[in-house]
Amino acid sequence: MNKKIIASGFPLAQNFLKKVAGDPSVQLVRICERKGKRTTDEELAKKMKMKVTEVRTILNRLHYRGIAHYQKTKNKKTGWYNYTWEIKSKRILELLLEEQKEAIEKLKTTQSFEKTYTYFTCKRNCTSVPFEVAAEFQFKCPECNSTMEATNSDQRVKKIEKQITGIEREIETMAKII
């Protein structure tokens, strides 16, 4: 079952596609989802009012990530190969889930550091460094040379917790779709 992730307007998936294959990839996937069957790169180029080579570039980027799949057939008259493409929308969500889980792990690591270490920041907020690094710089900002002071990491820990909660909600939404 191939769900219409992009056609339904799922913004997280659209942003992911833009990051993977550029802005026109959203339109390309939407066209493929609405068509509901394999389509050629020439057809897509015509509908998108783009060059075939540009469409092929997008398709190849999506193919590299396992989102686009093609079937190759040889035209007996011309000897050329025809490629018909299909979009695996479920794969978009699978990749998104992986990315979100990695983001949560990074945030949890950052959160752990925030809870474990005392951080120092300058008045201009150029940089934030743990105590050991601040001591090496004699509590002077390496960028602006102003005095660094200890920061309250409770607010940053709460901010990270909110980010983690937000991502977990997104994961729940995607899990329901899959």
Image (cartoon, rainbow, N blue to C red):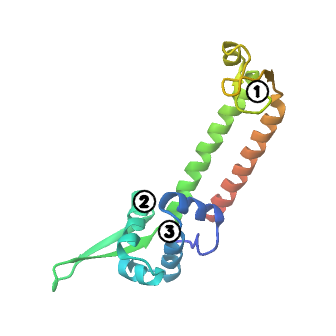
| Image x and y of residue 8, in percent | 63, 74
Residue at 40%, 72% in the rendered image:
55
Give left or right: position of 74 versus 42.
Answer: left
Q: Which residue is mark 2?
A: 66
- The Cα atoms of the two marked residues, 1 and 2, are separated by 43 Å
Q: Indicate which disc, 3 or 1, sits on the residue closer to the N terminus.
A: 3
Q: Which residue is mark 1?
A: 121
| Image x and y of residue 152, in percent | 84, 28
**Viewer-closest of 135 and 71:** 135
Q: Is residue 65 above or below residue 14?
A: above
- The Cα atoms of the two marked residues, 3 and 1, are separated by 41 Å
Give left or right: position of 151 versus 32.
Answer: right
Residue type at mark 3 is: Ser
Mark whose residue sits in front, 2 or 3: 3
Residue at 71%, 32% in the rendered image:
126
For the C terminus, which image quadrant?
Answer: bottom right
Q: Crowdedness of circle 2 by 10 Å Cα count: few (<14), some, many (20+)?
A: some
Q: Which residue is mark 3?
A: 25
Give the image quarter of residue 133.
top right
Mark whose residue sits in front, 1 or 2: 1
Q: Is residue 134 above or below residue 174?
A: above
